Amino acid sequence: MKAGIDFGTSTSEIAYVEEDGRITIVPNHLGETITPSVVYIAEDGTPVVGREAREKALADPENAFLEVKRLFGQNARLSARGKTYAPEDVAAIIVRYLLDCAEKHSGRTVDSAVITVPAYFTDPQRKEVMAAGRAAGIEVERIINEPTAASLDYGIDHMRECRHMLVYDLGGGTLDVTVLELFEGVVDVKSSCGNNALGGKDFDQALIDHVVSTIKKRDKIDVSGDPRAMMRIKIAAEQCKIALSEKNDSEIELPFLYSKGGNPAGYSETISRADFELLIREKILSTEQQIKTALFDAGLETEDIGLVLLVGGSTRIPFVSDFLTEILGLAPESAVDPDLAVVRGAAIQGGVLAGVLGENAIILTDICPYSLSTDALFDLGYGEKEILCDFLIKRNTTLPASASKVYRTSHDDQTLVYIAAYQGESLEPEENYMLNRFALGGIPKGRAGREEISVLFEYDLNGILTVTAGIVSTGKSATVTVDTAQMGRNLDLSKWKESPGAQEHRRIIVKAERLIKIHGEKAADGIEAAADELKKALVMGWDRSVTESLKENLADEIDRLEKGGGR
């Protein structure tokens, strides 16, 4: 059975399509269809998920994980009970729990899933979501963007409509603004823009900061260093925020929160909706830029939008609707459940892939949210040359997408070239996010510009990039699927000695290390960089053809230093 999973910053859900086409939202073991994305590690190492984990976090926050989705793509490390976890490890625990709930509820085995991600998630973040799914024991058949999933939920019941939609998805941790065209059963994504660091948790934080600041001013006590007090404030802030979506004021009551002069002290305050809106006003107003960018990229004006769809729990805040009505001139519609539309859409996509929906199937086209480029040496004229990004796949290109280009060697007798893949919109490589960099060796020696190097970028429906580089004259090539399981981690290069290829590379690496000691890092920086690249390739288990090319490059650097007067 295929399931749809919405793994969220605050909450997570799972659903599937029945054989008759009905969508079933799966309840957890407490009978709730919405599960807090919280994991608590018990004393015996057993993970607890959901509301019970959230409750345990109040008393023991050091052994609980909250909001791990916000840590994806940051190489973060978390710890509990003396054990270290990556964010995807914690996500896998949540996903496995949801899968167990679905299997118990349906009586069937879930073998694959469609998992949703924010539209503005980067390639590394998407890879980590897929890694979490695999660690939970399933095949992640498709990754789709959350606003796109929500539009599927709307579109499945409005198959004959033809109009442009703007989906404003403000969840617990991220914002996505996506412009789509819905026409006769086809959901065609035109553009997307977002902020992966803005969501309901930031609105909670505004209230938390207010409480901490008030206590500090009133009693000259800073409670921010007390994990238990801060967890209580965090829970109370979230409850207050939720209450203010329905009421004009809400009470924050926190008795025995801290100690003052040896006596217990508490905090009490009535927060009005106007007070709360003042605290979050600038954060909400900042999203106008994402709206403008999404409309511009889609080539549309505000008057072209026929429907504004609200998705994500944070869109329940009345100020959000008021803001959107003012800048778009169109009142947003709650035509879908803001909490469940994404998981329903994921289930629909799963049903389409499984062929369960039959003639009711809806067609989806999605886009690449970021531009993808490689770096190359450009002749700027007047003898000036500079390494700049050359865009192969531009943002908002419909997926799947592929593009290729042929480059030439840049200096005489060049035998090795490094192929880099970047994600971002700047011409300057250092201003973009480097997805990966790999070496292609074995280039026949010759004058600069004689040999041609072909570079192919392929971006699939899951938003995963594969890069292939080849030497045109010989046909030799190297391919990588950008591997975030290793990429960006702090690799222990000393472990090259334990790699399968260590023995045949030991002599040249030892020689390089000796030369670095003799000449110093500054004089032997080329050797050090080349040696580190070779060690990295050995640690990561790269193909022998790559390590041989890197070995040859290191030999060239050593030769260059020795001919320059070294020993």
Image: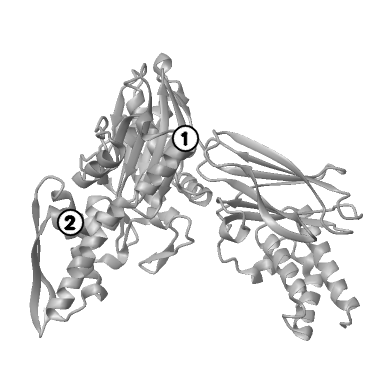
Q: Residue furthest top?
A: 359
Residue 448 is marked as none
Pick the front one: 295 or 180: 295
Across and down, in percent, residue 26 comes to 28, 35
Across and down, in percent, residue 544 comes to 77, 54
Dot 2, how many residues are within 10 Å of its Cα: few (below 14), some (14-19), or many (20+)?
A: many
Could you tell me if residue 144 is visible in this image?
Answer: no
Q: CA distance from mark 2 to mark 1?
A: 34 Å
Asked if marks 2 and 1 touch (Cβ < 8 Å), the reply is: no
Does 315 sit above or below residue 428?
above
In what element is the residue under mark 2? helix
Residue at image mark 1: 298
Residue at image mark 2: 276
In screen coordinates, is 292 left or right of 315?
right
Pick the front one: 104 or 305: 305
Quarter that holds the C terminus: bottom right
Q: In which quadrant of the rendered view does residue 454 lie?
A: top right
Q: In which quadrant of the rendered view does residue 416 lie?
A: bottom right
In screen coordinates, is 498 left or right of 349?
right
Across and down, in percent, residue 533 comes to 71, 64
Pick the front one: 402 or 354: 402
